């Protein structure tokens, strides 16, 4: 059984918008593909086990916070959970936010 997740809106980092601009790229994930999305500000990587009707079903492979640190759990989402990830919620991962140097 999969865990229901309310994914963040991907905004400007939407994967579907990228593939809509370049029809030569194949944006459909296949079993074994790693796709990403955002949940409560975290980058979430999902290893696809199945893909049907614009939805990836797979296991959470990584949870990465805004600093780039990996965590095992965030809220109700944990590594290893099976989730459904619609294409319209897929997002390119955001870069880690590093503290600003005082020398800049």
Image (tube, rainbow, N blue to C red):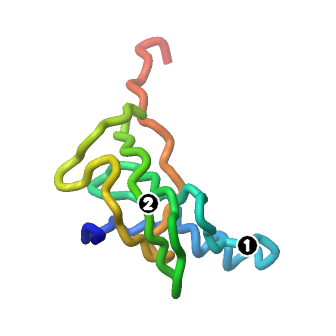
Cα gap from disc 1 to disc 2, whole angstroms: 18 Å
Q: Is residue 24 visible?
A: yes
Residue found at x 24% / y 43%: 73
Q: Which mark is residue 84?
A: none
Farthest left residue? Answer: 75
Q: Where is residue 24 drawn, in percent x and y?
A: 82, 74
Q: Where is residue 90 drawn, in percent x and y?
A: 48, 67
Give the mark nearer the N terminus: 1 vs 2.
1
Q: Is residue 12 visible?
A: no
Residue identified by numbered label 2: 37
Q: Where is residue 95 drawn, in percent x and y?
A: 50, 41
Q: Where is residue 47 drawn, in percent x and y?
A: 50, 57
Up/down of 63 relative to 27, above or below? above
Q: Secondary structure at mark 1?
A: loop
Residue found at x 27% / y 49%: 78
Up/down of 25 relative to 64, above or below? below
In front here: 99 or 67?
67
Residue found at x 76% / y 70%: 25
* Residue 69 quadrant: top left
Q: Residues within 10 Å of mark 2 (few under 14, many from 20)?
A: many
Farthest front residue? Answer: 1
Farthest bottom residue? Answer: 53
Q: Is residue 42 left or right of residue 61?
A: left
* Residue 20 quadrant: bottom right
Farthest top residue? Answer: 103
Residue identified by numbered label 1: 26
């Amino acid at each position: 059984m999969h865990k229901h997740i309310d994914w963040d809106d991907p905004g400007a980092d939407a994967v579907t918008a990228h593939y809509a601009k370049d029809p030569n790229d194949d944006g459909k994930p296949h079993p074994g593909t790693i796709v990403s999305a955002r949940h409560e500000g975290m980058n979430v990587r999902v290893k696809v086990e199945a893909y049907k009707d614009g939805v990836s079903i797979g296991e959470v492979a990584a949870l990465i916070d805004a600093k780039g640190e990996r965590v095992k759990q965030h809220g109700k989402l944990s590594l290893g959970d099976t989730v459904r990830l619609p294409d319209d919620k897929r997002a390119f991962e955001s870069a880690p936010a590093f503290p600003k140097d005082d020398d800049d």
